[in-house]
Each structure stands twice: as C-alpha cells, then as structure tokens.
Amino acid sequence: AMAICRWAGYPDLFITFTCNPKWPEIQDMLDLIPGQKPEDRPDIVARVFMLKLKELMNDIKNEKCFGQTIAIVYTIEFQKRGLPHAHILVFLHPDDKDPSPSQIDKIISAEIPDKNSDPDGYEAVQNYMIHGPCGQAHPKSPCMVDKSCAKHFPKSFCTETTIDEDNYPVYRRRDDGNTVDKNGVKLDNRFVVPYN
C-alpha cells in the first residue's frame, strides 16, 4: 500500500464494507440447516461476503461509481464476533478528485431517512448506522474517555456539506426533527454514522 501511495499520492476514498449476518443470502442458506446461526457457519458468511465484495469492487472499478480509479487497495479483517469487513482505499484519476459538496451529498449521507417516505432506509440507519447513546445519556459507554465521546459524537448540526481546512468533508446534518429510539434514548442526525 505504501508503494502505491508513493506512486499515486494519498487515497481519495476510505471505504469500510462490513458483512451483515442478516443478509438474505446468508439467512436463506442457514434456513436449510436447522438450528444454525451465522457464527456456526463461517464458510457461508465468508463466501457471501466475498461475493458481495467482488460486486462492490466491480462497481468501483468497472462501473466507476465514484469516477475513474487509478488504484485500489483493500484488506479484509474479522471483527470480534467473527464477521468479515474490508477496508478499501480508492485512488481516483486526477479528473475525478476533489468532489464538490453536492457530489458528496449524492454518495454519502449523515442523516436519518424519513420514516414515512423511506421506511427501509429508516430501519437500516436505526439498526446499523447510529452511534450511541453515549455522553450524558450513557456516561459508561465504551466510547467515553474523560467524559467525552472518543468518536466526537454528537456532531454539530450542519445545513450543508462543507470541506474543512484539512480537506475532509463535514457532512450535512440538518435539524429536521427525524429521530430514532435507541435503548430508550431519542437520537437525531448528530448521532448518524455517515453511510451510503
């Protein structure tokens, strides 16, 4: 990876692709084997994950969903629960570098979808893309260090996506009233982990 960085410069995108044991392809296979859970069948989990990762890599390289790439590096790791995830570095062609805030908004969101117009999106964000609760609502959360969240949640509300002085995006997080309930605590867009 360091040799590629010397040749191509810093990566433009850092993507984490995480296996979901509730993917229908995994659940359908487990239904054929009574009493089996994903942790009992790492072969099925790994096979489905690799097929989906291959599809994602095709979208990035051949379908050019982020623009033309000049290099891609990825590594696969396994979480404590045994689920695989991939860390992917994408190096874009110079013509596709430095996306505008509006281009970023087309790819990445840090907001809770509307429950009525996008119930599936709402449920996915509620189940998988909310940080916390932490802070005053849960001071003993594992992310809390010296009475502050080590992941810097809650983020600030922001009416539009901007690029900070270090060239990192500050994602749009509007105060639109959408909330999710997690462990009895109402959380808003300030607690959304960016997703696409």
Image (cartoon, helix red, strand yellow):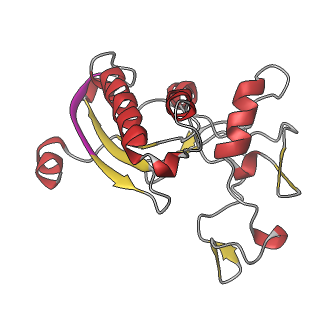
- Relative to 13, is 131 above or below? below
**Residue placed at 77% from the left, 76% from the top?**
139
- Residue 91 found in image quarter: top left
Expressed as whole percent of the image width and height from the top left, the position of residue 129 reads 64, 45
Span colored in magenta = 68-74
Image spot of residue 195 (x, y percent) = 57, 38
Pinpoint residue 117: horizontal percent, then vertical percent: 81, 19
Name the outermost residue toward the bottom: 146
Quadrant containing the C terminus is top right
Residues 43 and 180: in front is 43
Question: Residue 108 in magenta?
Answer: no
Instruction: Give the residue displayed 76% in from the left and 70% down from the top.
Output: 135
Q: Is residue 81 left or right of residue 54?
A: right
Q: Main secondary structure of the magenta part?
A: strand
Horizontal and vertical percent for residue 148? 68, 75
Asked if 185 appears above or below 31 in the picture, the reply is below
Disc count in the image?
0
